[in-house]
Amino acid sequence: MEWGLLGPEHLAGSRRTRTLGVGAAVRRFNQLAVPGLGGVWFAKQLFLATLGVVVAERLRQTSRNVKTLEVANAVEALACWGAFQSNDWRRDARLRGVQKLAGKADLTFAKLRQPRFYVTQPMRMATVEALVDLGFVHPGSQRFNSFRCTESGRDLVEAATSEYRPYRLTVEDYLVRLATELAPITITPPLQLALSPIEPLAPIACDLIRGRLCEGTGGNKYAARRKNGLAWVSSIDPGKPANWKAQPPTIDNDHWNDLRRGALFFQARDAAIDVLIEIETAVTRIDAQTIAPAASAEIPPVQNQLRKLRDAAQRFLDENADPTEGKIASNFCKDCTLADPAEIIRNLVRRDSRVLQLRGSHIVPGSAFVGRPQAGDTDEDAVGPGTENVGRVPVPEDISPRVQNLYLLDLDLNHRLDSFLNPLPDKETA
């Protein structure tokens, strides 16, 4: 499986993902918010993916049968395996695969790179756009397997690993050796510290990433938004969260309007999903698990969510400005403001089609139907900081997740992300 530059940024459970046919609009608003960031929210994501590309290039010098994404997956799996060993297998938003990797022993690089050995949604998938836009790789045919490391990418790997010498080798040389041998891997302290996603990058590597985030700001007005956004999130006082009432001085009017309109669209999209969740709940309670759109529109919780949906969609339409190709966002919101609630529901179920679907004139469970999602469920493939952490990011409500990610990335580049993700109990901070 190969993933290109337009892969999804957030995969909080791909089986349950409801795109509603507006994925292109979501990508557009995210690009306008923070161009080229993809789903990156901490620095080790960029480093590990780049390191995987570097190791794959070295291996390709002596073997034709080398797939860059398999090597990158193996490097990431090894990094998480070592991190779990160091933290007694505690979950952390920066680590993947606690279930897949638990109890594994006598691991070799060949095992780590096997398909389905590690999680199906590795962190690497969130980095493909940023690796290209920040200049760490040459995109080739815009597939991860075609990536080739740039000089900046090699500088990143060197800066991140220069102080670590597993078995007196560079980290790169040692990983190449592991990939060509059959011996089980031993996680030495230098290797664990160099790779672990829960260990911060060396300051010089952080400075390099920060510099790349601010590159290209002269010729491309959208690229300049990365630098301006970084200046904004860096200035936010956690005790005084940013809101929509005060436009930051580093954000120009066009950028601010795009951020604000994006938030309005995300509100409408989320409200539509809430309508579907209430219908899903209703279908779960019915023995026949089938309901007509008109009947579902009479259910009080569904009616309540429909009102919220209409209001949110109308607020976006009132802006009379839609930057999405083909007016995807506006067309979606128009479908959500129809006079007939049953028709709104039919449109939403047609757009869903995976969790709920139409069969004739009735709503029935789709292939991904499980009933109302349970709070607290953990997903082995979840990619991102998690809702519990995003909810504490002091940025305006419903803003593009890329702004939230940029805030977290800025914390990480300043070595303050760990204290944000793992705050001390109140009694210890008193």
Image (cartoon, grey):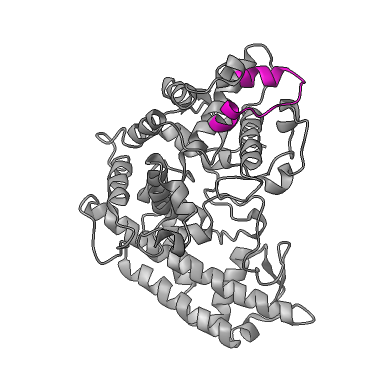
| Viewer-closest of 405 and 2 | 405
* Figure label count: 0
Question: Residue at the location (39% across, 46% down)?
Answer: 411
Give the x, y percent position of residue 186: 69, 27
Q: Quadrant of the C terminus?
A: bottom left
Residue 114 lies, with reference to residue 414, above or below; the image says: above
Residue 394 lies, with reference to residue 127, above or below; the image says: below
- Image position of 212 (left or right of 131): left
Residue 409 lies, with reference to residue 254, above or below; the image says: above
Residue 351 seen by the camera:
yes
- Image position of 225 (left or right of 78): left
Give the x, y percent position of residue 364: 72, 73
Residue 7 lies, with reference to residue 397, above or below; the image says: above
What is the residue that sits farthest to the top in this orientation? Answer: 62
Q: Quadrant of residue 180?
A: top right
| Viewer-closest of 144 and 40 | 40
What is the residue that sits farthest to the left in this orientation? Answer: 249
Question: Residue at the location (34% across, 58% down)?
Answer: 238
Q: Quadrant of residue 353?
A: bottom right
Indicate yes or no whether the magenta region holds residue 192.
yes
Residue 142 seen by the camera:
no
Q: Quadrant of the N terminus?
A: top right
Magenta residues, start to end: 174-193
Indicate yes or no whether the magenta region holds residue 304.
no
- State the predominant SS element of the stretch in magenta: helix
Give the x, y percent position of residue 347: 57, 71
| Viewer-closest of 346 and 208 | 208
| Viewer-closest of 381 and 295 | 381
- Image position of 89 (left or right of 144): right
